[in-house]
Structure formats: C-alpha cells, structure tokens
Amino acid sequence: MDFGVLGPVAVRVRGVPVAIGGTRERFLLALLLLADGEPIAGARIVDALWDDPPPSAKQQLHNVVSRLRRAVGRDDLIVTRTTGYELRLAGDDTVDLMRFRALVVDGRHARAAGDDAAAADLFGVALALWRGPALADVPDELAGTVRHGLHEEGLSAAEARLDALLAIGQHAEVLAELTPMLVDHPHRERLYLARMVALLAGGRRVDALDTYRLARERLVSGLGIEPGPELRDLEQRILRGE
C-alpha cells in the first residue's frame, strides 16, 4: 500500500487509488503518517480536528477512525492505544514523505562527501515526489500549520539542490529554476544569493547587483528588514571587484 501527503492525501493499492472518505478522514490519516509510527494522543487529534470540540468529539473521532479503517480495508492499520491512536505500516507499505526525507538526507551526505553531482540528482529525485501543495485536499483551517512545515522542508531541499547545481557549474539551469521560485518566495534570501552567484559565474556583474537591490527592496517593503550578512557581504565583494 502506498501513502501520499506531498500533494492530495492519497492511498494506492497496487497502483489503484483508494477512496479514503471526507476531510477529517484524510487529515487524520495525514496526522498519523506524519507521526512516523509514534502514537498520537486522542486529545491532540481532537484539538487538530475541531477548533471548538463538541461534547461528542471523542465519539466522533472513534467514528472517523472506523471509517478510515474500512476505507483502506485494513483493520490493523490504525491501532487503538490507551490514550490515542497509532499507525502501523506493513513492511511493503511506502510513504512519499518518508522517501522524500530519506533522499534529502542522502543528498546532504553526498554534498558533505564532495559529490555535488550525486547530491543534485538525489535532491531532484526527492523533489519529484511532490505532486502539488502538501495535503492539497485538506482545508487550511485543519492543515495550515502542518502544510507550512512540509513546504519549508521542500523549499530547503530545493535550495540545497540549487547549491549543488552551482557547485557543478550548472548556472543556466539554476537561473531558469530561480525565476518562478522568486515569484513564489519573494522574501527568501538564499534564493537571491543563489541568483547572484549564478549571474556572477556568467560574468553578469551588473545583473547580480540589480538582484541585490531587488532583494533589499522586497525585504524592506515586505518585511521591514535589511538583507542579511551573506547578501550584504556578497554585494560589497562585487563592488570591490573581488
């Protein structure tokens, strides 16, 4: 059985999609998958599923668990504990998030070992597991905080891939990938830093300085802060002709 949270919450059996019920069933499955085998207290699940839990919340949670078990066709998938619930995966089950995290760890190890080409490939394979926004079919009022944390992991991996591509001289590819990323993340300093480095590698000093000015303008107007020390230092080095 294959489980997915990097996009719409999904369950597949031998490649065939399984209907897993409504919003609460999908979010509960996502919470259990994110727990990575650790039990989750029932009270915590209730708080995640309801802003203002009704008196019947405990029974409603029990019903949600029962519907989810029936939907996936495995009574042993969700184990009831004294204080909550635990997801018990079988040996051949897969979870896209766990695969993503393992590939990212391998990519960082490859970078640390000096194999930037392998690192870029590993980060690329990890990012290809994303099918859209995490938990895409779960409303923000339920999944907003969880989704933000997952997206931060994805963006960090994308930045690490850009660093690896820069290290192996793939400057044009970096510039191409940065264009949409800066639209989506206009206050992300590491993206501006990568763009400046890629432009400098191509001899485009003026464009690199323009990128710094754009970064400063967006950071000051959007967040009320000046660029951090890495961006400022790179700008000064360019101005000094270093």
Image (cartoon, rainbow, N blue to C red):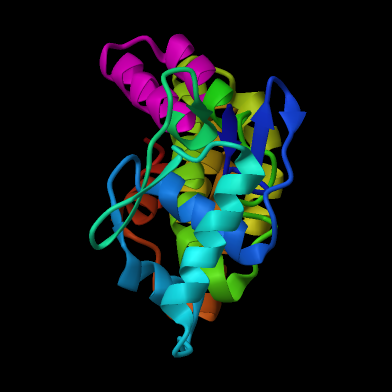
Q: 165 or 214: which is nearer to us?
A: 165
Q: Which residues are magenta?
A: 99-123
Give the mark count. Answer: 0
Where is 14 relative to 65, above or below? above
Quarter residue 207 falls in: top right
- Residue 57 spot, x, y in % from top left: 46, 80
At horizontal 57% and vertical 24% (from top left) the residue drawn is 124
- Residue 116 spot, x, y in % from top left: 41, 14
Main secondary structure found in the magenta portion: helix
At horizontal 36% and vertical 44% (from top left) the residue drawn is 237
Quadrant (top left/top right/bottom left/bottom right) for the N terminus: top right
Q: Is residue 184 visible?
A: yes
At horizontal 32% and vertical 73% (from top left) the residue drawn is 43
- Residue 199 spot, x, y in % from top left: 58, 35
Q: Going by the image, does 5 lie left or right of 101? A: right
**Magenta stretch encompasses residue 134:** no
Quadrant (top left/top right/bottom left/bottom right) for the C terminus: top left
Where is 213 relative to 91, above or below? below
Q: 217 or 159: which is nearer to us?
A: 159
Q: Going by the image, does 185 lie left or right of 180? A: left
- Residue 123 spot, x, y in % from top left: 49, 25
Where is 24 relative to 77, above or below? below
At horizontal 45% and vertical 10% (from top left) the residue drawn is 118
Q: Is residue 215 visible?
A: no
Q: 67 or 169: which is nearer to us?
A: 67
**Magenta stretch encompasses residue 114:** yes
Where is 218 relative to 185, above or below? below
Q: Going by the image, does 115 lie left or right of 161? A: left
